Image (cartoon, rainbow, N blue to C red):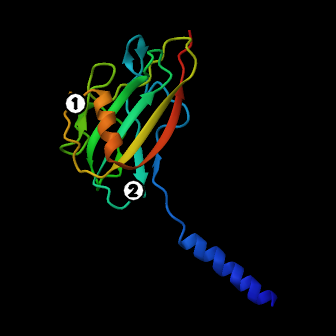
């Protein structure tokens, strides 16, 4: 009887592992829990390298036709947060952006991928640059699995409109959060 119970237990554990649903996941090999001078913006009083982190994702849901990525700081003292990066129309067969891909001039993204205007007023990645002494800010980086291959927007589209289109086309999303602070 003990052998039968053991066999049943092993079968149940194995079958639950085999059939466990894989979740849509975002990760970075260059960005940990804290942003660094590599990611920090170069401007607005900041002197960082303004280099976007490497990002990779896996287990996108069935039906994904494209991806988008955003980076947002809800702690910015603006009343509406701060949009640091908006990238969309990433083909469904892409599952990684190399470090520095947010530099529009570097052409590290596949043809047709759009990086629209941020709250800095520029296109592409604009890294963390919280006011000195304002404390830790969180930088929410999200990848969206979308049900459309193109959002139909341009590089001049503002963050609120991009967000609206993302919201109405999202199948799933995955997020990582990094923190950054500038001392006085």
Q: Sequence-wise, which precedes: disc 2 or disc 1?
A: 2
> Nearest the camera: 97 or 77?
77
Q: Is residue 13 left or right of residue 98?
A: right
> Nearest the camera: 173 or 79?
79
The N terminus, quarter of image: bottom right
Question: What residue is pinned by disc 1?
Answer: 105
Among all residues in the image, which is located at the extreme right? 2
Is 78 located above or below residue 52 in the figure?
Answer: above
Residue at (65, 77) in percent of width and height? 12
Q: Can residue 101 be spotted in the picture?
A: no
Question: What residue is pinned by disc 2?
Answer: 60
Residue 29: x and y in percent read 47, 44
State the SS at label 1: helix
- The residues tagged by marks 2 and 1 sit, at their Cα atoms, a distance apart of 29 Å
Label 1 crowd (10 A; few <14 / some 14-19 / many >=20): few
Is 119 located above or below residue 110 in the figure?
Answer: above
State the SS at label 2: loop
Residue at (37, 27) in percent of width and height? 84
Residue 141: x and y in percent read 44, 37
Label 2 crowd (10 A; few <14 / some 14-19 / many >=20): many
Tell me which corner region of the image, top left, top right, bottom left or bottom right, holds residue 136.
top right
């Amino acid at each position: 009887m003990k052998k039968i119970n053991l066999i049943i237990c092993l079968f149940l554990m194995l079958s639950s592992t085999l059939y466990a649903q894989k979740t849509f996941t975002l990760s970075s090999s260059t960005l940990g829990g804290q942003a660094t001078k590599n990611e920090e913006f170069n401007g607005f009083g900041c002197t960082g390298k303004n280099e976007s982190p490497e990002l990779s994702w896996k287990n996108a849901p069935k039906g994904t036709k494209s991806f988008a990525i955003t980076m947002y700081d809800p702690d910015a003292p603006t009343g509406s947060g701060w949009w640091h990066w908006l990238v969309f129309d990433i083909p469904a067969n892409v599952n990684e952006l190399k470090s520095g891909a947010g530099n529009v001039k570097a052409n590290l993204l596949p043809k047709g991928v759009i990086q629209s205007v941020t709250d800095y007023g520029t296109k592409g990645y604009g890294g963390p640059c919280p006011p000195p002494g304002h404390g830790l800010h969180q930088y929410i980086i999200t990848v969206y699995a979308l049900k459309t291959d193109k959002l139909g927007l341009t590089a001049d589209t503002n963050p609120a409109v991009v967000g609206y289109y993302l919201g109405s086309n999202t199948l799933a999303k995955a997020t990582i959060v990094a923190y950054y602070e500038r001392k006085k």
